[in-house]
Image (tube, helix red, strand yellow):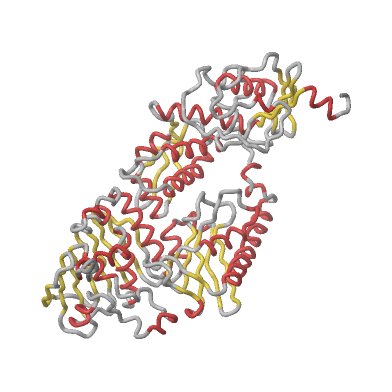
């Protein structure tokens, strides 16, 4: 049977191509910025309305285009970057596939105004949904301005998958910040709904650009590194181990001027820190790699956000060694100044116990346990004499063992208790984590966590991306007990913090909360957090507030902890899934010492 195969209409082909390049407003911004940089712009201004869903405008002072080139730029496979297939192997520009402008024009109402250097007149080109362009003369300064209105207006299926404007704006901010770090010689300005949210001076100084994007406090924590070998060179800045985040998002990777995502380089940096960073913590900074274009493949992904290296092992070793050398010097310097290294170990920080020294048994928490959905996975590796004592996920909490009394504390980390025939070893930090977690979640389900106003508010200078997260999630942060007051561009006053949290820890915990929110897949509505994320943030708050290991407890404090654990906790596992209690029967012990 014939006639089943046909050539697609050109408009359909353009929309399919657009789907590869234009995923969301941030994709449009990225493509237009890279075109501006390739045009040798020294200044790029980006203006966004409603997260780019209504309007995106990118204006530069680059070389501009003649009328003929402006029209050709809107044709598929038209590019000034390559002339032959061999050129792809040595491409040094950011864009080269000749797809961006026609793809964007196919799914929006696009207006481009451009004027080439030395030309007496400018050109205006208007394209609506991939239709033939309308061209006219237009007064213009040298350079190019592209305005994209009503993105996906003719592809409603794509438009309905866009997130809330504030979420889309956060994605755009991440793109612009990455491009600014990749090109510190270019001045960037980002305006959202008439308000400037990001600015860099274009000084060409990478460290200054980091300060402009991340804030001076973060910039001061950075250490410089540089190395070269085998035709490759790396340099940049990373934070000393005292400053870290809960994800790798704040470690920017730049390869030959291209902002990319590279698990290889991120892993190399993490390896360099070794044990100086706690598990699950990651550094902040930027890694710049320069390598022969012949030894990389930048066309792995249609949006050119990923990259492949010919010598992955050599690059991994180079980055890891360079960062390790810089971090080693940083740690040594900090240690010599303070006389100790415990600032880099979160478990060694001295702090007051959450349990007051005069607290009596039974007064720590209310007896009514909150009903929540928490993580109570248990470990198969736990060796206990009476494993049946530990409840499974679906089992109810056991009653307090009859005759349970405190024996003492070992290693300032574990409470030892016993009944007539069983010994109990209780991880004091894990126990307090569970109690705090249950209490926090219970309060969140009602009116929110009680906050305490701080006497002298901390001044928090956030990165552009973190500031967008704050604006997007103010209501959720309020319920968590964090009250922030805007105080100038990306600067906030921390007016209130959760009542149970040490004020000295509030800023660090808040940074973790912002990182957790940022890492969550975007919801349909701004500020709508998933239950999994809420549970994770509650676990972080509980972990930070709980009494730590290496903390001496009084007899009354140990008794209060055990009483609360067996009357209020919802499970005998901490929020991270570790067992709180390990038991040994009298028979087990007697067998081990040869009495049976």
Between 519 and 545, the one lying in front of the other is 519
* Residue 158, image x, y percentages: 26, 55
* Residue 496 lies in quadrant: top left
- Residue 364 drawn above or below residue 202: above
Toward the viewer: 500 or 217? 500
Left or right for 477, reference 154:
right
Q: Could you tell me which residue is drawn at 60 percent across and 23 percent down? A: 565
Q: Is 505 drawn above or below residue 594 in the view shown?
A: below
Q: Quadrant of the C terminus?
A: top right
Q: Relative to residue 366, is residue 486 depicted above or below?
A: below
Q: At x 65% / y 59%, what residue is drawn?
A: 333
Q: Quadrant of the N terminus?
A: bottom left
Residue at 31 percent across and 54 percent down: it is: 169
Percent coordinates x, y for residue 437 in the rendering? 52, 31
- Residue at (56, 50) in percent of width and height: 281
The image shows residue 351 at horizontal and vertical percentages of 61, 36
Question: In front: 292, or 204?
Answer: 292
Q: Is 584 placed left or right of 271 in the picture?
A: right
Tell whether 130 sits left or right of 184: left
| Residue 243 visible from this viewpoint | yes
Q: State whether residue 355 is above or below residue 246.
A: above
Expressed as whole percent of the image width and height from the top left, the position of residue 154 reads 18, 58
**Image quarter for residue 484?**
top left
The picture quadrant where one finds residue 348 is top right
């Amino acid at each position: 049977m014939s006639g089943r195969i046909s050539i697609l209409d050109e408009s359909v082909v353009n929309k399919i191509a657009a789907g590869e390049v234009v995923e969301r407003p941030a994709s449009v911004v990225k493509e237009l910025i890279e075109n501006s940089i390739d045009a040798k712009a020294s200044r790029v201004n980006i203006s966004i309305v409603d997260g780019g869903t209504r309007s995106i405008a990118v204006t530069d002072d680059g070389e501009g285009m003649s009328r003929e080139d402006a029209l050709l730029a809107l044709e598929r496979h038209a590019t000034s970057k390559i002339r032959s297939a061999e050129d792809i192997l040595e491409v040094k520009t950011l864009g080269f596939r000749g797809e961006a402008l026609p793809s964007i024009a196919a799914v929006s109402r696009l207006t481009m105004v451009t004027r080439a250097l030395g030309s007496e007149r400018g050109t205006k080109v208007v394209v609506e949904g991939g239709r033939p362009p309308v061209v006219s003369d237009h007064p213009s300064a040298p350079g190019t301005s592209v305005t994209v209105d009503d993105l996906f207006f003719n592809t409603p299926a794509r438009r309905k998958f866009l997130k809330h404007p504030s979420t889309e704006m956060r994605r755009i901010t991440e793109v612009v910040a990455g491009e600014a770090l990749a090109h510190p010689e270019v001045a960037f300005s980002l305006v959202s709904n008439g308000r400037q949210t990001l600015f860099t001076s274009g000084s060409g100084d990478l460290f200054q650009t980091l300060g402009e994007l991340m804030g001076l406090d973060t910039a001061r924590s950075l250490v410089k590194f540089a190395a070269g070998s085998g035709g490759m060179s790396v340099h940049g800045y990373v934070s000393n181990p005292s400053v870290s985040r809960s994800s790798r998002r704040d470690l920017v990777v730049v390869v030959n001027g291209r902002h990319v995502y590279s698990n290889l380089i991120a892993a190399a940096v993490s390896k360099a820190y070794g044990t100086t960073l706690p598990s699950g913590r990651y550094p902040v900074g930027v890694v710049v790699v320069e390598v022969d274009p012949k030894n990389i493949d930048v066309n792995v992904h249609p949006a050119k956000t990923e990259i492949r290296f010919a010598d992955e092992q050599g690059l991994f070793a180079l980055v890891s060694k360079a960062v390790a050398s810089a971090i080693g010097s940083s740690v040594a310097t900090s240690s010599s100044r303070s006389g100790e290294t415990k600032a880099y170990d979160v478990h060694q920080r001295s702090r007051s116990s959450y349990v007051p020294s005069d607290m009596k048994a039974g007064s720590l928490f209310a007896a009514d346990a909150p009903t929540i959905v928490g993580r109570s996975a248990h470990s198969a590796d736990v060796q206990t004499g009476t494993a049946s004592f530990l409840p499974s996920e679906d089992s109810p909490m056991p009653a307090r063992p009859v005759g349970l009394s405190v024996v003492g504390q070992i290693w300032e980390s574990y409470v030892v208790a016993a009944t007539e025939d069983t010994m109990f070893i209780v991880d004091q930090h894990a126990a307090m984590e569970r109690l705090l977690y249950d209490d926090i979640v219970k309060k969140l389900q009602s009116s929110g966590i009680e906050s305490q106003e701080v006497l002298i508010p901390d001044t928090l200078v956030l990165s552009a991306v973190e500031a967008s997260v704050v604006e997007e999630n103010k209501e959720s942060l309020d319920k968590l007990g964090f009250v922030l007051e805007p105080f100038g561009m990306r600067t906030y006053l921390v007016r209130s913090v959760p009542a149970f949290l040490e004020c000295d820890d509030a800023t660090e915990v808040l940074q973790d909360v912002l990182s957790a929110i940022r890492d969550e897949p975007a919801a349909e509505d701004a500020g709508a957090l998933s239950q999994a994320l809420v549970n994770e943030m509650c676990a972080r708050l509980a972990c930070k507030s709980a009494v730590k290991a290496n903390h001496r407890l009084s007899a009354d404090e140990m008794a209060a902890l055990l009483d609360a654990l067996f009357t209020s906790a919802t499970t005998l596992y901490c929020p991270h899934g570790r067992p709180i209690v390990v038991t040994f029967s009298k028979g087990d012990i007697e067998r081990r010492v040869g009495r049976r």
